Amino acid sequence: MQLDGKIAIVTGAASGFGAGIAERFVAEGARVTIADLDRARGAEVAAAFGDRARFVAADVSRGADFAGLVEATVGLWGGLDILVNNAGITHKNGPMAEVSEDEFDRIYAVNVKPLYHTARHAVPVMQARGRGVVLNIASTAGVRPRPGLTWYNGSKGAVITLTRSMAVELAPTGVRVCALNPVAGETPLLARFLGEDTPERRAAFRATVPLGRFSTPADVANAAVFLCADAAGFLTGVCLEVDGGRCI
């Protein structure tokens, strides 16, 4: 019960890492708002977690939606202690010049802009309580960028830099800001990361991870609980690799 009594929002929580984080947060005693664009799947996930989870539909790239998400969470649970910015998208692995401008804009709108919305809409709620944790899900792609995912790499690099800058600025107010950098995992985005989901491409990628496997939602959720719990109260600006050694 490391998060007993905490109130959390997890974005992109209808599947993948977000669903894994939300499930573990509930198990650790938190009340969780499941935020996602996928209404059917988001409602199903929230229902599976019982009365400590509720679904709120939101496009986190839009300021009005983000403000509504925070407002709904405060209305549901009475406050906000933890915000996990997990929602993210990528382009298909391939030459950078072949990514359309619309796709480029959407990647930065979904992967980076929510941090701006966080500062505008979520942080003031935390500051009023004198405490809070913002956890941004970045990626090893922002630490060790490889060809084929250039614009995605850049968006996650921005998340890492913004995490550190936000951490320094918000530290005097009692709000901590950290990030996780997972290696590619068993999520709906895997096929786009690889370019094509084949046994050969999976094997080639696994060979680059010293511990020899992809990440899992449970791996990321375990690290998220650690950074969001009171036991990590002296950690801020930490961008923790959850990568089986890939970034070494």
Image: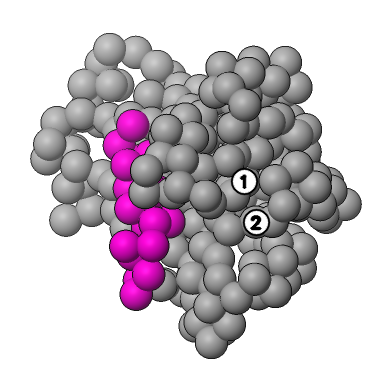
Specify the segment rendered in magenta.
Answer: 218-235
Which element is circle 1 on? strand
- Disc 1 marks which amino acid? Ile
Residue at the extreme top? 199
Left or right relative to 97: residue 29: left
Considering the whole magenta stretch, tell me its main secondary structure: helix
| Residue 37, horizontal then vertical, whole percent | 73, 30
Against 113, residue 169 (above or below) is below
Q: How many marks?
A: 2
Label placed on residue 80: 2
Residue 242, x across and y down, in percent: 29, 47
Tag 1 residue: 9
Which residue is outermost to the bottom?
Answer: 172
Q: Quadrant of the N terminus?
A: top left
Farthest residue, direction right: 64
Q: Nearer the viewer, residue 109 or 102?
A: 109
Marks 1 and 2 close (CB-CB < 8 Å):
yes
Q: Is residue 168 magenta?
A: no
Establish if 86 lies above or below 170.
above
Query: Tell me, what colour scheme is on the image?
Result: one colour
Q: Position of residue 135 (x, y in %)?
A: 50, 57
Query: In this view of the protein, which residue sits in the foreground, 1 or 53?
Result: 1
Image position of 148 with respect to 166: above or below: above
Question: Can residue 167 be seen by looking at this rendering?
Answer: yes
Identify the residue at image location x=32%, y=58%. Answer: 240
Q: Is residue 98 left or right of residue 136?
A: right
Q: Residue at x 58, y 48 (%)?
A: 8
Number of other residues with Cα within 10 Å of mark 2, as a class: few under 14, some 14 to 19, many 20 or more = many
Residue 201 percent across, percent down from the top left: 30, 21
Earlier-in-chain disc, 1 versus 2: 1
Q: Which amino acid type corresponds to the residue marked 2 in the rendered image?
A: Leu
Residue at the image position 58 percent from the left and 22 percent from the top:
50
